[in-house]
Image (spheres, grey):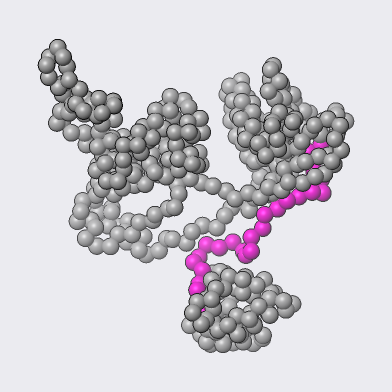
């Protein structure tokens, strides 16, 4: 089937004339693209190009993956020709553009939340832990390794993350490489290689690869030969221009998990560089579930009529149709609170969530987040909601919801 995808592209360049579509086409018919400026009203939003990409796919479910491959080909050429930046911002729709069809299948991506809430992890324990680590005068090699670890954490591309983590690992490993000579190993049985001419097992100083393996085994006792080989394969592929997706059959599923495996190893390597006495007092570290940055996106599969413009091309503006992701509360940055209540009090909060007033949404959130724990209900209260509740109790306000929370928390909110 033939499809057309509607992308928005961040770029340093614009089409010379607003409203003009520039067209390019692959000579073998793999794709054709149209590019036009998205005119903005002010400087609060980035400049974007609209890029409509037409291509063939087996079905609509596979069309998104095919579109990403064709988009990469298109952006590669734009960057090569112009020497300027062209970065995928987001995808808006993919439309089945099979000829002579009136109602068309479409995938529509919802507008993302934009900026997600942070994790409220920073506190005095973290700053005290940093003070403890700063007492150690870190050598230059370790500072460089910590820099690459930080860059890897910050990167949004898993391929880049893996390479940055590997740089950190290699810096530490090579700086500590033993001067004791080692044997070369048989690639099959791992026994020391024997030279028939010299009648001996040749020795040499450890290669960088051997030093890295030794360091990994030192900090991660359970790391087996298969994992070491997988990490080595990923490193070799990336350093020679391939991508993790291209070697995904050699990697865990999903293939991005290899980033987490290496990231956790590098973390342990870095921590092991500090003197033991640093940890004579409590030192707190964060332990992320993943280093890979992911964004939740809503995608709707709809059937609709897609009009064509004066040039006979599909009008992908979809005026009047919009999919938006919403949250169940205002932006948060502080830690939520945990409160307990009786089952009757929980039911009364549920009733207040249907009562008109500015408390309705707050009560709904508190009611829906509650879980039965023993003989009472326990619920998570957003920090902004808790501030509002405590403030109204301290002021002595009265009303249906204020009185209920006074019963639950007491006059002082304790």
Residue 199 position, x and y percent, is 11, 16
Q: In the figure, is residue 219 to the left or right of 24?
A: left
Q: Residue at x 12, y 19 (%)?
A: 200
Which quadrant would residue 48 be assigned to in this image?
top right
Q: Residue at x 80, y 45 (%)?
A: 303
Quadrant containing the N terminus in the rendered view: top right
Please count the marks in the image: 0
The residue lying furthest to the front in this view is 189
Majority secondary structure of magenta residues: loop
From this view, report whether residue 350 is shown above or below residue 142: below
Magenta range: 315-340
Query: Is residue 338 shown in magenta?
Result: yes
Residue 304 position, x and y percent, is 82, 44
Q: Residue at x 63, y 49 (%)?
A: 297
The residue lying furthest to the top in this view is 197
Q: Nearer the viewer, residue 208 or 234?
A: 234
Q: In the figure, is residue 147 to the left or right of 108?
A: left
Q: Nearer the viewer, residue 140 or 191?
A: 191
Residue 317 position, x and y percent, is 79, 41
Visible residue check, residue 270: no
Q: Residue at x 57, y 73 (%)?
A: 370
């Amino acid at each position: 089937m033939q499809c057309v995808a509607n992308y928005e592209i961040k770029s340093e360049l614009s089409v010379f004339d607003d409203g003009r579509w520039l067209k390019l086409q692959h000579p073998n018919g793999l794709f054709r693209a149209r590019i036009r400026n998205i005119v903005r009203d002010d400087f609060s939003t980035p400049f974007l190009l609209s890029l409509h990409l037409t291509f063939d796919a087996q079905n609509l479910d596979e069309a998104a993956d095919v579109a990403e491959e064709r988009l990469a080909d298109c952006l590669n050429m734009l960057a090569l020709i112009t020497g300027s930046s062209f970065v995928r911002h987001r995808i808006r729709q993919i439309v089945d553009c099979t000829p002579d069809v009136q109602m068309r299948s479409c995938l529509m991506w919802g507008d993302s939340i934009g900026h997600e809430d942070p994790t409220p992890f920073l506190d005095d324990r973290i700053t005290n832990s940093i003070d403890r680590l700063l007492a150690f005068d870190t050598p230059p090699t370790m500072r460089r390794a910590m820099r690459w670890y930080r860059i890897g954490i910050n990167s949004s591309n898993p391929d880049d993350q893996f390479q940055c983590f590997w740089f950190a690992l290699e810096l530490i490993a090579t700086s500590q490489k033993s001067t004791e000579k080692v044997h070369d190993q048989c690639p099959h049985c791992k026994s020391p290689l024997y030279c028939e001419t010299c009648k001996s097992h040749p020795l040499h100083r450890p290669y960088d690869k051997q030093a890295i393996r030794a360091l990994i085994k030192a900090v991660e006792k359970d790391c087996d030969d298969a994992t070491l080989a997988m990490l080595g394969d990923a490193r070799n592929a990336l350093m020679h221009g391939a991508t993790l997706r291209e070697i995904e059959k050699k990697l865990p599923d999903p293939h991005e998990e290899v980033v987490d495996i290496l990231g956790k190893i590098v973390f342990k390597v870095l921590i092991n560089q500090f003197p033991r006495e640093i940890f004579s007092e409590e030192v707190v570290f964060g332990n992320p579930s993943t280093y890979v940055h992911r964004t939740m996106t809503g995608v709707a599969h709809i059937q609709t009529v897609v009009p064509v413009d004066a040039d006979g091309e599909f009008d992908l503006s979809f005026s009047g149709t919009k999919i938006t992701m919403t949250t169940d509360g205002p932006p948060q940055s502080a830690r939520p609170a945990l409160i307990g209540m009786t089952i009757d009090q929980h039911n009364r909060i549920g009733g207040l969530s249907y009562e008109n007033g500015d408390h309705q949404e707050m009560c709904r959130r508190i009611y829906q987040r509650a879980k039965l724990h023993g003989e009472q209900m326990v619920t998570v209260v957003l920090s902004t909601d808790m501030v509002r509740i405590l403030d109204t109790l301290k002021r002595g306000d009265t009303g249906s919801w204020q009185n209920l929370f006074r019963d639950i928390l007491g006059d002082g909110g304790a």
